[in-house]
Amino acid sequence: MTASTFERVRNIASDIFGIPADKITAESSPETIENWDSMQHLNLVLAIEEKFGVQLEPEDIEGMKTIGAVAALVEKKLQSAAH
Amino acid sequence: MCGSMFGSMSDSTSNSTPDSTSTERHPSNLRAQVDALIAEGAFDLAVRRLAELWRRDPASGTASFVTSRIDELREKLRDNLSLAKFKLAILRSFTVEPIVPLLRAEAFAHGIDLEVYVGDFNTYVQDILDSQSSLYRFAPNAVVLAVRTDQAAPELWRDFASLTPEAAMQAAERVVRGYEQWIGAFRKNSQAALVVHSLERPSPPSLGVLDGQSEAGQSGLIRQINRELRHIAAGFRGVYSLDYDALVARHGSEHWHDERKWLTARLPIAAGYLLQMAREWMRFIVPLSGRTAKVLVVDLDNTLWGGVIGEDGMAGIKVGAEYPGAAYQALQRALLDLSRKGILLAVCSKNNLDDAMEALENHPGMLVRAKHFSAMRVNWTDKAQNLREIAQELKVGIDALAFLDDNPFEREQVRAALPEVTVIDLPKNPLEYASAVRNCAAFERLTLSSEDQQRTEMYAAQKQRAGAEQTFQSKEDFFRFLEQEAELEPVSDLTLARVAQLTQKTNQFNLTTRRYTEPQIAELFNRPEWHIFSIKVRDRFGDHGLVGVAIAHDEGEQCEVDAFLLSCRVIGRTVETALLAHLAESAAQRGRKRLVGWFLPTRKNAPARDFYEHHGFELQATSCEGSLWALDLKSSTLRVPDWITLKVTAEVTPGGKN
């Protein structure tokens, strides 16, 4: 995964969860981020779709269990869109 | 997008050259700046940076950031944000929660601090019918009824193909009767505005192209329901229809919808279009909260026409029926539409006056002419200064101005110097100019009075009056020359909308600045002890229309003035004296001994400050909110000035009005 995709995902997560970006790591998850409930999960999905112009499937959304996993998913979507 | 930011101080850091590309103004840096400014206690500036952040990056993540900082600022400023408060309730059949931050951020950019209540899924009928429901306890200013067709008309949406034509018609009829009942119940329980989503047609319809062959098809019946919904809404004050079907069509049904989110999260709208839903709601919230623009000030070169008149000349500038001039004609058509809604147009251009007038008067491709502009500043002075002068000339507040200019530098300068002006961000491509103007919520109106439609002509007459005034020795001579005729009448069905509109919009000559909606005025009108008068004024130059309102109520021996206001067009022509004299006279006739009234100062109503004192009232009390004045009706010498011919319509007396 490229650093910039992770950075962008991290900035979006920082806005959505209301915590500073430097407190968010690839391992951050609903267990470590207090605000990460189902409504904020939806908000995260929508912000990702909006910012990256990708469409996430219900299966994708279930797999978004850490910030690192979200960034990897976005990267994969962007690559398959490019081909 | 377009928006204005309210704040009394000007932005000292922006006096340097505005530069939209500098990294300092990059969204992520703006976030850091906002937090630093909040930490320093520079709250006004923080508000301004927050608005800039939203302009540059209006997205879901930004909305979360912006709303959290607004909440923080509100707390720090102890509820003293320089924003208008507005409470919106959303009753819904689908997930709207992700739209709420976008909506609140948009509202913030329009100078509104929006509090949002979201009803439970599909409980809108109970919420509306139960007068004790949490909906009404929230005391909203406005309510949106956002129900999708699949919920409002499930048979027509899902099972249409299996219905007989009669059953389908009956189903449509039931839907309409349902809405009629809910809207009626709502109006009984609340005076808030109600915005009802119309129903969307299925795309594609159940029977494919066959559906298009009959008016009684699935689409045809839903269209019919929508027609009837509009009709029902028109029958109630303060009930409006939001054309959801047209909104979806504008953006394209296939782009608008996201079936995955609908099935997994009950969210039918795709991520990229949630902002558009929020903006559509804003088109109602902005006029309902009174944050509208009354004047649009336009630049000329490369805005009203393509090219620079001073260099390219009459033959060189582009405006006409063909491309590329057609883009500018489309913008001009949008401007004329605004003018028909009562929004005044003005020019502010760095140009030679002769060049500009030549194009405005004689260019064959122009649709807008000099006569359409109520004020003009064609010179080489700073635009912010010109805007101040235009506001003064047209007797409106600076916050009533919107500004249209292709030059980002001028826009940033105006924003920095006059944050209360609505600055429209014109896109780079002139083909998109017209829609940038048409999409600006500050120009939305929910009702149109005859005053609105004639406003440009009224201001032209005003110019003649101002010219005449200078030739008279004394004010009295001028007043006599004006031959003013005033018509005083109790509020009626015909004038209710305009009366409410004036209470919403009048800032300067307004003694108490109490805002009333149409239903609230209607409610006061029905109370026997309340008296609501309006005044219409005409003079030798033309008709001012309905320009003043007085609301008073009797209590024991006294009559208290609740609201007293006059459009700035007629301030200082003694019309206010006539209106007050009538209030006093009618109160005396009803047996009251004293006329009392508060003056509640605001940032804008200084013109009304000495009004009571000048009319022989005596100060009774002062509080932190204002001062209370009283006039002894027995010894009062207050009279209608003899140069005003006053026609009074007596109050009617049904319902025990005395």
Image (tube, helix red, strand yellow):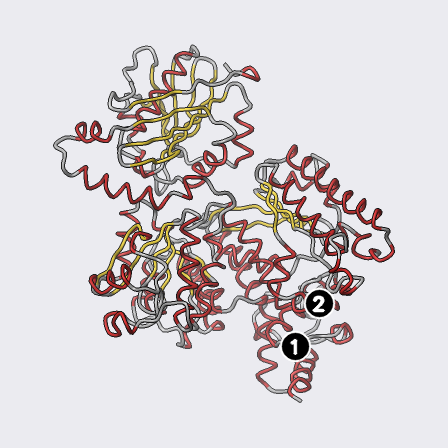
Quarter holding residue B476: top left
Quarter holding residue B220: bottom right
Mark 2 and mark 1 in contact? Answer it, CB < 8 Å: no
Q: Vertical placement of A83 versus B547: above or below?
A: below
Q: The disc numbered 1 marks a residue on which chain?
A: A
Nearest the viewer among B291 and B449 is B449
Measured from the top left, where is residue B559 in percent x and y?
A: 43, 18
- Disc 2 crowd rating (10 Å Cα; few below 14, some 14-19, many 20+) is some
**Label 2 sits on residue:** B258
**Which kind of residue does numbered mark 1 sit on?**
Val
Position of residue B506 in the picture relative to residue A39 (left or right) = left
- Disc 1 crowd rating (10 Å Cα; few below 14, some 14-19, many 20+) is some
**Which kind of residue does numbered mark 2 sit on?**
Asp
Report the disc number at residue B487. none
Q: Vertical placement of B347 versus B309: above or below?
A: above
Q: Is residue B407 visible?
A: no
Measured from the top left, where is residue B468 in percent x and y?
A: 19, 38
Measured from the top left, where is residue B396 in percent x and y?
A: 33, 46
Q: Vertical placement of A66 versus B628: above or below?
A: below
Residue pushed farthest left? Answer: B473
**Label 1 sits on residue:** A54
Measured from the top left, where is residue B118 in percent x and y?
A: 66, 50
Q: Residue at x 54, y 29 (%)?
A: B522
Position of residue B215 in the picture relative to residue B298 (left or right) = right
